Amino acid sequence: MLIKALILVLLNGMVFLAQAQAPKLVLLTEYQQQNVDGWLMSEKLDGVRAYWDGHQLLSRQGNRFYVPDWFIEQLPPFELDGELWLGRGQFEQTLSIVRQQQPDDRWQQIGYYVFELPNQSGGLQARLAVLQTYLDQFPQPNLHLILQTEIKSGFNLAEHLKLIVAQGAEGLVLREPAQLYHTGRSPYALKLKPKWDAECTVTGYTEGKGKYQGQVGALLCLNDQQQLLRLGSGLTDALRAMPPELGSRITYQYNGYTQSGWPRHAVFLRVREDGF
């Protein structure tokens, strides 16, 4: 019994140590028509967020990515924050590669696109210059800096957004370049998209009608503002027959807010994979 008790203690300790601890990262706020002249803009990549702590690559939730050794060997001994990205419109393909516990040769297609260097000194450009210096000395095929472009005016911003969206991009990230590194939801790091997205937790379902009789009509979902949303649009027949489980986190898309502060025209986008 004593040996069994000691084993349980050790196992409990191992479980505790293995629990994911989410890294503290900068989080984007939605652009609300504020003046951003002189800020920097970059493409918002539809990839998988990844934090390099100098030793291992972690998801936004703190779970370790199982990465080939050759990929890890490209990364510098200082922190990075960016996206694992395959290309525009290829989020699902990217996810299918990076979530594998046995990494395969498809990782050769994945790029790590960096937009921030956590805990470096100076403004954004000074922080990013640290990685540029590293890449100048040690060029790496899968490690990239995301291009930053100065915003000249509101018209310049609108035209750039229109151009890259037409090319298949999902939107822009706007950064105030003078800000020192900080974490959490930031008024100096904004996302600008033709359509916005957010996350919510599935709390229930409504019954389908007509051709959806006997299936799910809509998902009931509680967002971070404690608003109960009804998401029917965007659901495939397969999801209506086998919907996300209660408690699942999903992403929905919407077009701004109503006057009362509710997401306008909210539609289901995708199930958010645990840990990513």
Image (spheres, rainbow, N blue to C red):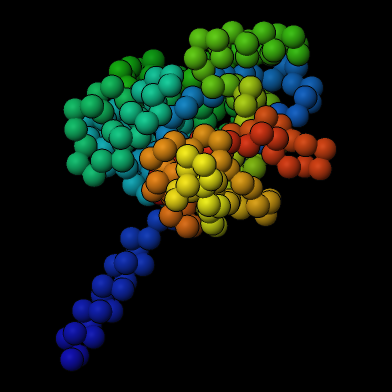
Quadrant for the N terminus, please. bottom left
Examine the rendered structure and indicate whether residue 45 appears above or below residue 234: above
Q: In the image, what residue occupies the spot 54% across and 28% down?
A: 127
Residue 53 visible in this rendered orientation of the protein: no
| Number of numbered discs on residues | 0
Q: Position of residue 269 (x, y in %)?
A: 51, 35
Examine the rendered structure and indicate whether residue 63 appears above or below residue 234: below
Q: Position of residue 109 (x, y in %)?
A: 28, 22
Residue nearer the viewer, 59 or 270: 270
Tell which residue pokes out farthest to the right in this image: 259
Tell which residue pokes out farthest to the front in this image: 210
Q: In the image, what residue occupies the spot 31% across and 40% down?
A: 99
Residue nearer the viewer, 19 or 122: 19
Q: Position of residue 132 (x, y in %)?
A: 45, 19
Residue nearer the viewer, 44 or 130: 44
Which quadrant of the view contains residue 108? Answer: top left
Q: Position of residue 222 (x, y in %)?
A: 61, 53
Q: Is residue 175 left or right of residue 96?
A: right
Q: Is residue 207 left or right of residue 273?
A: right
Q: In the image, what residue occupies the spot 51% across and 10% down?
A: 167
Q: Is residue 32 left or right of residue 114?
A: right
Residue 154 visible in this rendered orientation of the protein: yes
Which quadrant of the view contains residue 29? Answer: top right
Quadrant for the C terminus, please. top left
Q: In the image, what residue occupies the spot 21% across and 79% down?
A: 7
Tell which residue pokes out farthest to the bottom in this image: 1
